Image: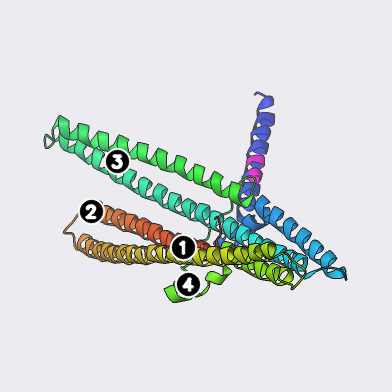
Amino acid sequence: MDRSAPSALYSVRSLFVLLLFLLGAWGSAQDALEPLSLAGAQTRAVQGSADVVNAARDLDAAQRGLARVEADPTSLRVPLLDARHAVAAAVDSLRNAEHAARSAAADAFEALLEAEFDVRVAEASLAIADIEAQAVRIRREAGAATVSDVARAEDAFRSAERQLRDSRDGRGLARDRLALRIDVEGELPPLVAEQPGDDAPTLEASLARLDEHAALASARRAVVRAEANLAATDVAFTTPQAQIEAARDALASARDRAEDLARTLELSVRQAFNAVTAAQGREASAEETLMTARDDLFVATTRFESGSIAEIDVLRAELTVLQAEASMSRATHALAASLRALEGAVLGAGQ
């Protein structure tokens, strides 16, 4: 008898136990990953954004500058206004940087959810193509199908295989983009698809918020500064008339620029709002399509249970539902993106 056999058996068992331990540890690590919500991804994106960090530093510097000017008893009105306006501009820049980071994270988050749907649809399509190819081969052997029928079925199967590979590649790229946006190294946690948020604001409410627009606020601060400069310049017997006229011209120009900008931005907000309305219509259409697909699946399941159709017909109906769900997801995400764009148009983010 080979005395080395027990030792070899012990080694195999040890390796098997070690493998089970490693698999268990890997599974525990997977379970330990907290699901990632959209809000969580946006928070991480803001925390890791270099633009947000720089904007926060600029705000801190502006606040220190304002404190110095305010502490100086000899400070004049215009320099004090400049310091306060610098703080206000820095606040707007920080807010817009945070909005941009949240929007970019949301785009990447939703793109990954859509890529996951694409993979599921491709997997279901491949499963159906495989069944159909096998069925055609069986019919061919029975003399009920031609060589061309087999070739077409096999071409469809290979096309479904390519589509699945492409979908998985797209999912990998989407994961990489999201990981980059939210500054995650290693494996991403599972994503949590959330229900849509609040309803869209009215056009009137959006237009009423144009005072928050960074560029418009800056233009209006320029008007305030020009008014203060004119007041400081227009002093009898102390300032040449030419200098006073120049200050008046500067104030008129500042007012014209602010008014022109307000009209331009109102048009931009209206266009962004129209995009939201169009996205709402597409989402409603996608929802109707999904409801119809689900009704068709119910009918197909009932007919299959009664023996009037084959199981492959139920699988096709399930695939149609899955495709409709993917379209619904895309429409919902497109609506969310249009709402973010409307908010950006109101705030002047990214401009």
Residue marked by disc 3? 130
Are the residues tagged 2 and 4 within 8 Å (C-beta)? no
Q: Is the residue marked by circle 4 packed among few (<14), some (14-19), or many (20+) residues within 10 Å?
A: some
Tell which circle, 4 or 1, labels the residue nearer the N-terminal end.
4
Confirm whether residue 347 shows in the render: no
- Horizontal side of 284 relative to 31 (left or right) equals left
Q: Residues within 10 Å of mark 3 (few under 14, many from 20)?
A: some
Q: Amino acid at mark 4?
A: Leu
- The x and y percentages for residue 181 are 59, 50
User: Does residue 339 appear left or right of residue 151 in this picture?
Assistant: right
Instruction: Give the mark toward the camera: 4 or 1.
Output: 1
Q: Which picture quadrant has residue 307? A: bottom left
Task: State the CA–CA distance, disc 1 to disc 2.
Answer: 55 Å
Q: Which mark is residue 264?
A: 1
In the image, the segment drawn in magenta is: 18-22
Disc with the residue nearer the chain's start (3 vs 4) = 3
Q: Which residue is mark 4?
A: 207
Circle nearer the viewer, 2 or 4: 4
Instruction: Tell me which numbered mark, 1 or 2, is placed earlier along the sequence.
Output: 1
The kind of residue on which mark 2 rests is Asp
Q: Which marked residue is nearer to the observer: mark 1 or mark 3?
A: 1
Quarter containing the N terminus? top right
Q: CA distance from mark 3 to mark 4?
A: 55 Å
242 left or right of 152 in image:
right
Q: List the residue tagged with mark 2.
A: 313
